[in-house]
Amino acid sequence: MSRAPPVTLCLLAGAVLLLATAAAPCSAQQAATAMSIEEACRTAASVHAGVSYEHCVSSLASDARSRDAADLHRLAVLAARMAVDHASTTEARMEDLSEVEESPRARSRLHKCLDLYNAAGDVLRDALDNIRARAYGKASQQLAAALGASESCEDVWKGEERAPVASHDREYGRMALVALGLTSGIA
């Protein structure tokens, strides 16, 4: 019987530990500790390098629902809702563009992006349900999976002068990252 090299065992043990801590829900007290938007966004930016602190603060503070979100759990719920809203807005924009687009190739690309965002919206809604249920590890995995929609949609438009939904893609991606950073900050 061959034995795995010690490095492989260490990596395997580390991966198991990482998965176990990611799946372990935060205590209700930890998630419910009062926290300002600025503190929550510092946490999100420190947990996930892709989160822009400034964008996180301005996005959450601009939403009237943030007045009722005074802890990390509620801010994660709000960010996930906002990501769902961005996905829905992006879908609607693509549907509108598809209706007036004359080029069959561009329409096909829009439909592909529409499928990506439709799937991402479903995953985001599941993540939102898991955040509400305080299953933060599962929600983090789902949010990470939903991030791919914006990048995949941008890839669909490679080779073209411009992607007609690029600004929507960027904003969706940034908001989904905020939701992931906040949720991961609890997990």
Image (cartoon, helix red, strand yellow):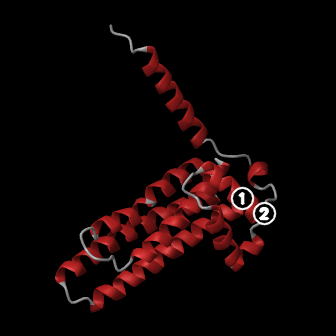
Residue 138 in the image: x percent, y percent?
Answer: 54, 50
- The residue that disc 2 covers is 36
**Relative to 82, 61 lies left or right:** right
Residue 80 in the image: x percent, y percent?
Answer: 58, 65
The image shows residue 68, relative to residue 36, as above or below, that is below
Q: Give the distance between the C-alpha atoms of the residues marked 2 and 1, in whole angstroms.
A: 6 Å
Three-letter amino acid code at disc 2? Answer: Ser
Toward the viewer: 54 or 40? Answer: 54
Q: Name the image quarter holding residue 32.
A: bottom right
Q: Are marks 2 and 1 in contact (CB under 8 Å)?
A: yes
Identify the residue at horizontal 65%, vertical 45% (top origin): 25
**Relative to 98, 44 lies left or right:** right
Identify the residue at horizontal 35%, vertical 84% (top origin): 95
The image shows residue 90, relative to residue 119, as above or below, that is below
Mark 1 Cα shell of 10 Å, populated few (<14), some (14-19), many (≥20): many
Visible residue check, residue 46: yes
Q: Name the image quarter holding residue 107.
A: bottom left
Query: Element type at marker 1?
Result: helix
Residue 16 in the image: x percent, y percent?
Answer: 52, 31
Three-letter amino acid code at disc 1? Answer: Ala
Visible residue check, residue 129: no
Toward the viewer: 24 or 101? Answer: 101
Query: Mark number for residue 40?
Result: 1
Mark 2 Cα shell of 10 Å, populated few (<14), some (14-19), many (≥20): some
Q: What residue occupies the far top of the structure in this picture?
A: 1
Identify the residue at horizontal 42%, vertical 65% (top origin): 120
